[in-house]
Structures are given as C-alpha cells and as structure tokens.
Image (cartoon, grey):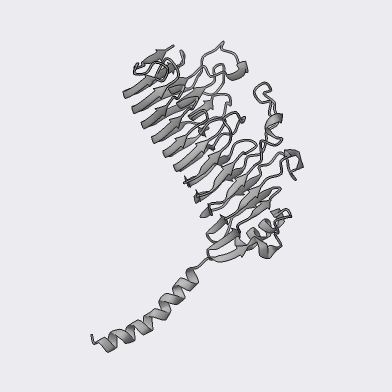
Amino acid sequence: MTIKCISSLILLVLPLILAYHTFAQPQIFDITTYGATPDTDISEALLNAWEDAIVSANESKIVIPQGTWMLSQAELAGPGLGPIEIENQGTVLANADPNSMPNPKAQWIAVNYVNSFTLSGHGVFDGQGALQAWATNDCNVNRNCSKLPINLSFNFMNNSVIQDVTSKDSKNFHINCLACMNVSFIRLTVVAPGDSPNTDGIHVARSTMVNIADSVIATGDDCVSMGDDLTQVYIHNVTCGPGHGISIGSLGRNLNERNISGIYVKNCSFIQTQNGVRIKTWPSAPATIILSNLHFENLIMQNASNPIIIDQQYCPWNLCNLTSPSLIEIRQVRIKNVKGTTSSSHAVKLSCSSAKPCDDVKIGDVDITSAKMEGTKLGFSLR
C-alpha cells in the first residue's frame, strides 16, 4: 500500500474514531444547573439530576462540584437505562439533627435498584454524627432503641463500584450493602472517633460477589461487619483501626437467617483494634444456619486486643441470656500467617458452641507476641 493510500485511509478513519470518542463521553448533569447553591439544601437538585440521568440510554454522570453542600436526604432509585455515575468532588454535609430529616427512619443517602452504578470523585460525605446523634444513641442498654440513619446505603444493586470517596462521622453505620451482586468498594476512607457508637465502616448482608479493597477504615465499631446470606466476599488490603475489627455476625437472633459461605479476608492490618478477625453468634437464639469456607490469611496485628476470636457466646451489655448454646454451625475455617502484637493474654480465642462444636478449623503460622511483655509469644484460649 502506498503512502498516499495510507494517508487517505487515515483521513477516512480518523473522523470515525473522533466521532466514537465524542459519542462515548458521558452526558454530564451538574447539580448547579438544577439550582443547587452552597447555602441551600441540594436534595431537590440532586434528585432532579438523577431523574434525568436514569432515563438516558447512554452513560451519564451527575457532578457535585467542589465546595461545601448541605443535603437533607436523598433516595435515588432505578432502574436506569444506561450506566450512571455520581462524582462528588466536594464535601456534602448532613443535618446534625436526625429528626430534621424528611424521613428520620430512612437512610441519609440511599441508592436502590440500579445496575452499573459508580460513586467516585474524592469527595466527602459527612454525617455530622458527633454534633447531636451519638449522644442520643442508647442501643447499648435499649434493645428497642431508635435506629439512626446510615450515611451511604446501597440496596438491590448489580455490577457497581464505590470508589475514591470518604465517609465521615456517620450517625450510624457508614456504608450498607444489602441484596447486591458484583459490587466493589475500592480505595475508601471511612472515619469516626474510636468511641463513636455503632459506626460500623461497611456492613454487608444478603449479597454475593462483594469486593472490599485498598481502604482505610477507622471507626467506633466493626471495621467491616457481615450479616447473613453471603457468598463470595473478598476483603483485602484493608487497614482497620480504631474499631472492633472485621466481624462475621453477630448471627443467630433471627429465625429466617441464611447460610454464609466463601469469605476471604487477606492482607489486612489491624491497628489498636478491639478485635482482629471475629466470628460472633448469639446463644439462646433460634437460627440454625451454617457458616462455612471461611479464610483469614496474611494478617498483621498491632496491639489488637483479640487477634483471632470465635465467640459463640456473644452477649454484649448482657442483653441476652446464656441458658442455651448457640445453634449456629461453624466449619471449614482456615486461619494462617497471622503476625504481630496483642494487648491481651492470648493470640487465639475459641469459644465454640456445645450444641454445634466448631468443625474443621485449621490454624497455622500464627506468631503473636504480647505488647505488654515484649517478646512473649502467646497461644490459645479454649472454652
């Protein structure tokens, strides 16, 4: 082919390439074009932008620009016709008083029934829990306590990514993932003081193929907590602390709970946490589910109180009784290559059910020393 022919071909194809890239760019929905201003509640502008974006068959992006924005509450529901992204470049603030929300019993920001959703932008979602909400939390003494709103709630979603955002000082759990499939949480920062109540970092339940990776989670409760009906959950490269560690459970209190299988926690660090990795089930409770195929590998503990714990007599604040053993069955657990220090007198604590003893639990290559007595290696506590 001659140079002249090649040049002609390039001139013919180039406009098609440019046209393709032009077509492939997402359609932008900037909330400021919907009337959002820094001194007003942006919930209506965000909802209007969302309603326009979900009817677009092409890729859509809702932009929250740099700056500080007030948002009373938002429920963003699908389904949508095409992929949709929210890019938060700023700091979004919740109302300090949870009772001032339009629906105090709902979550602060919820995204439901969406396929191919992305949340990004390096922005901050600040629940402002420290100002009023945490002081009203009495769940440690009241089983019928009022539930405070979650910062970010994702429900009935598929093939979605939550990445490069910060959740700060949520009134309750920071992030909730319920009834989802193939959802990833990547490069997140989740932060609240170590004494903030019920501020779990990421809570996952009734989902499959959930990936939590490359994130820093520092809260007053579980770094990651897992409820029932889970399969294929991958947690890796997560730094946790302060907080209560990475937990499966608590489980057993509800009769209709479902099995858990295929949990992989790898390459994670625990800094000044109450626990490292934990499985917790309630005694004297009705559920009879099976937890199986659980893997904990390549973990670093830095002064973690309970590096490895299976607690089937979980009964915080004495809100239950110990008259009957847990009916949850735990089996096929693999724990290996766990190193570091602890502030307690044991590296591994196994408190298994007398009714359903732990089965096929293999623990190896655990090297935990006492933070109080430097160099003293610690072993197992069984009961």
Residue closest to the far bottom = 4
Residue 137: x percent and y percent? 68, 29
Observer able to see residue 56: no
Q: Which quadrant would residue 194 be assigned to in this image?
A: top right
- Residue at 64%, 23% (x, y): give it: 140
Classify residue 271 by image quadrant.
Answer: top left
Asked if one can make out residue 158 in the rendered structure from this viewpoint, the answer is: yes
261 vs 264, nearest the viewer: 264
Tell me residue 55's x, y (percent). 61, 63
Position of 155 with respect to 241 (left or right) is: right
| Residue at the left extreme of this rendering | 1
- Residue at 35% of width from left, 27% of height from top? 338
Q: Quadrant of the N terminus?
A: bottom left
Q: Quadrant of residue 146?
A: top right
Tell which of 213 and 263 is nearer to you.
Answer: 213
Question: In the image, is residue 116 above or below residue 305?
Answer: below
Q: Using the image as rendered, state which of residue 203 and residue 258 is in the foreground.
A: 203
259 to 208, vertically: above or below: above
Specify whether 77 is left or right of 369.
Answer: right
Residue 267 x, y percent position in the rendering: 37, 36
- Does residue 290 sit above or below 152 in this rendering? above
The residue at 51%/22% (across/down) is: 281
Q: Quadrant of the C terminus?
A: top left
The total of numbered circles placed on residues is 0
**Residue 76, percent from left and from top:** 64, 52
